[in-house]
Image: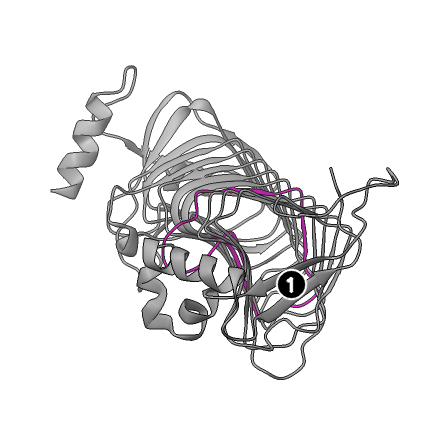
Amino acid sequence: MKRLGCVLALLALPALAAFPAPLQPLIDATPAGGTLRLAPGAYAGPATISRPLTLEGGHQAVIVGDGKSTVLSVAANGVTLRGLRITGSGDSHDRIDAGILLEGDDHLVEDNEIDDVLFGIHLKRVNRSRVSANRVSGKPLALGLRGDAIRLWYSQHNVIEGNRFARARDLTFANSADNRIVGNQFSDGRYGMHVIFSPRLLVENNRLSDTGTGIIVLYSPDLVLRGNRVAHALTDGGGGIVFKESNDALVENNEVLHCSVGLRVDAPPASVGRLTVRNNRFAHNIVGLFFYGEEGGHRFFDNRFENNLNTVAISAPGAGSANVWRGNYWDDYQGFDRNGDGFGDMPHEVHLFADRIWMETPLATFFRNSPVLEMLDFLERLAPFSTPHRVLQDPRPRMQ
């Protein structure tokens, strides 16, 4: 049935043969270092490139998989893939069936269209390669059955730039240090970016939307997250940006909008390295910031907190208590700027009143923002019947 579906898809495309010509003989006939420019039409995969060469499709050549495996595999160094359409991988997670499997170093994969694949582009022990300006869309499967749009495994010093990903599970970077992920777009997935055991990544100017979690960083120190826009990450208990036991990151100039949590810092009670969070905008989130389990010591400078349903939440008293705050804009600040220097005359403080009920008792989260808790919170602020807990103090809040 899968073979029949591939043939029917080809018949629907103009100027393509009903029965694709096999691609492997053409690859085998191309000398090392040569260029294979495919004529317009359809070519049958799977195929494997085992020597350095350039394969070009001119946006008119389609490589059609057999629906049982990876469509195009590269087992060499210095291969260029450009202007191809690749479609019809298998559906096995065990085999990691993909549109393109790369092994080796110094590859260029650019300006290709990859669709109806389980995994999009899989880099397996690949170094010093560039994946640029590709368009990847996965199979029309339920979210839990999809593969990753791009997957790096034990791969270093690569550039993933200007790609458009859609309808996949994650963008995954596992055990892959020192990569640059710049200017990509991803929507309709589980994790926008899933970073695990991958230190020193540069994640810059990406656009992620309509995922369960935006960017989740696990056990990966020394990251730079700069200029990214994360929106509509509302499910799976995550948030816009999530850090777990990942030290010494720089989070700056990002915009996190309409997420369950803007920034979540999740770590054990033991001391962790500091995050520097500056010049970000957290707006229209259910919770702007959430601190779980650790005292912190993170630095929050010159950020904007606007129209969040709850500005800050903590797992228990003491979480985030060592964080440093300065020059942030808080839309609920109630002070004045009498000397006109652009900063408030008194510190901005966030206290927990009735909020403590749902923050300290997870089962009560169901009633968060209910009329009863809102009334209880109002009464406790009016005439406290318990000592409120101070979560943070910004001694120099910004007015504009």
Q: Is residue 202 left or right of residue 386?
A: right
Residue 149 seen by the camera: yes
Horizontal and vertical percent position of residue 100? 43, 46
Query: What segment carries the magenta color?
Result: 214-241
Residue sticking out furthest to the left: 1
Residue sticking out furthest to the bottom: 270
Vertically, is 298 above or below 113? below
Kind of residue indicated by mark 1: Ala
Q: Residue at x 49, y 73 (%)?
A: 385
Q: Is residue 270 left or right of residue 368?
A: right
What residue would you read off at disc 1?
177
Q: In this view of the protein, which residue sits in the foreground, 58 or 172?
A: 172
Horizontal and vertical percent position of residue 183? 61, 38
Q: In this view of the protein, which residue sits in the foreground, 243 or 168?
A: 243
Instruction: Judge whether residue 121 is colored magenta.
Output: no
Q: Is residue 257 left or right of residue 167?
A: right
Please tell me how crowded label 1 is: few (under 14), some (14-19), or many (20+) other residues with Cα within 10 Å.
many
